[in-house]
Image (spheres, rainbow, N blue to C red):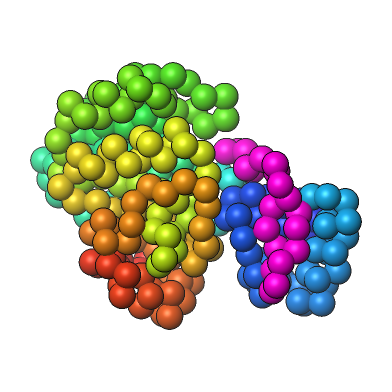
């Protein structure tokens, strides 16, 4: 991989997760830690990130990676999580699904079902499920954002409050034992928080690359999470820390 390609991927990863260690970058890029350190120095000199002890954080004011960019990352892990999460939805159940690339993967996994009702703010989720005439799909109203194809705002939250569902399936930007589930922007966190509040069972879909880091806006604490669905790369120590912090059950996709 050429240095320019590495730099683009480093910035995309960092914008998505907000803080990564040198070891994490090396594993993602398939290069040595020495190569990563040189890349981080060059990127800091150009003002695109800030180095901290053991890794890097976004430069002040750096925007989050676009939805399209985030959708390209960790596709296999997201699909594995979706496959593991789908059976959690019992026949006849009603669920909230929020907007994100992982929940879009879940929608594709659920597309063959005809025994559930889905309420979502995600245009992608609604489109993936709406092709099946046997499924009942409700797309929440609200304000459309320019990046993520989904609805947000007071109308969306107000409509969520009218429903009491069996399960909410949410995909946050990060999950940390100390800070809980977090998102990068307020309006996304607000919708996710409302969905969790109005669900009997609260399920978070989080790939291993999002574990152990934090973002800007808290969605919920670990004690508010009934089930965490993650992938096979999740470190046992991280999972134990999340259990100790209050996560009730963990499903690890294989």
Q: Is residue 33 visible?
A: yes
Please tell me in which quadrant of the rendered image residue 27 appears: bottom right
Total numbered labels: 0
The magenta segment: 49-68
Residue name at image x 64 percent, y 43 percent: 65
- Whole-percent x, y for residue 66 in the image: 62, 38
Magenta stretch: includes residue 133: no
Image point (66%, 55%), residue name: 14
Residue 178 pos. (x, y %): 41, 66
Q: Residue furthest left?
A: 92
Name the foreground residue: 217 vs 7: 217
The residue at 41%/79% (across/down) is 236
Side (left or right) of 172 relative to 61: left
At 29% from the left and 37% from the top, the residue drawn is 194
Q: Quadrant of residue 52 in the image?
A: bottom right
Evaluate whether residue 135 shows in this view. Answer: no
Residue 219 in the image: state x and y as whole percent: 38, 47
Location of the N terminus (image quadrant): bottom right
Which image quarter is the C terminus in? bottom left
The front one of 150 and 220 is 220
Considering depth in this image, is 7 or 194 the residue closer to the camera?
A: 194
Does 66 appear in magenta? Answer: yes
On screen, residue 221 versus residue 231, left or right, reads left
């Amino acid at each position: 991989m050429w240095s320019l390609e590495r730099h683009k991927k480093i910035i995309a990863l960092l914008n998505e997760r907000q803080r990564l260690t040198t070891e994490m970058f090396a594993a993602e890029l398939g290069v040595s830690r020495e190569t990563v350190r040189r890349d981080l120095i060059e990127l800091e000199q150009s003002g695109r990130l800030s180095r901290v002890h053991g890794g890097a954080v976004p430069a002040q004011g750096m925007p989050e990676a676009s939805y399209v960019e985030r959708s390209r990352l960790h596709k296999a892990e997201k699909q594995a999580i979706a496959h593991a999460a789908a059976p959690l939805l019992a026949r006849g159940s009603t669920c909230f699904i929020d907007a994100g690339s992982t929940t879009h993967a879940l929608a594709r996994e659920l597309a063959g079902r005809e025994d559930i009702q889905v309420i979502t703010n995600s245009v992608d989720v609604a489109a993936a499920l709406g092709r099946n005439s046997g499924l009942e799909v409700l797309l929440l109203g609200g304000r459309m954002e320019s990046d993520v194809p989904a609805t947000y705002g007071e109308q969306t939250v107000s409509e969520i409050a009218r429903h009491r569902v069996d399960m909410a399936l949410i995909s946050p930007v990060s999950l940390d034992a100390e800070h809980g589930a977090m998102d990068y922007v307020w309006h996304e966190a607000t919708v996710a928080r409302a969905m969790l509040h109005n669900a009997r069972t609260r399920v978070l879909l989080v790939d291993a690359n999002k574990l152990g880091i934090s973002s800007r806006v808290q969605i919920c604490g670990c004690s508010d999470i009934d089930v965490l669905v993650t992938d096979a790369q999740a470190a046992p120590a991280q999972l134990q820390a999340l259990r100790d912090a209050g996560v009730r059950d963990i499903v690890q996709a294989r």
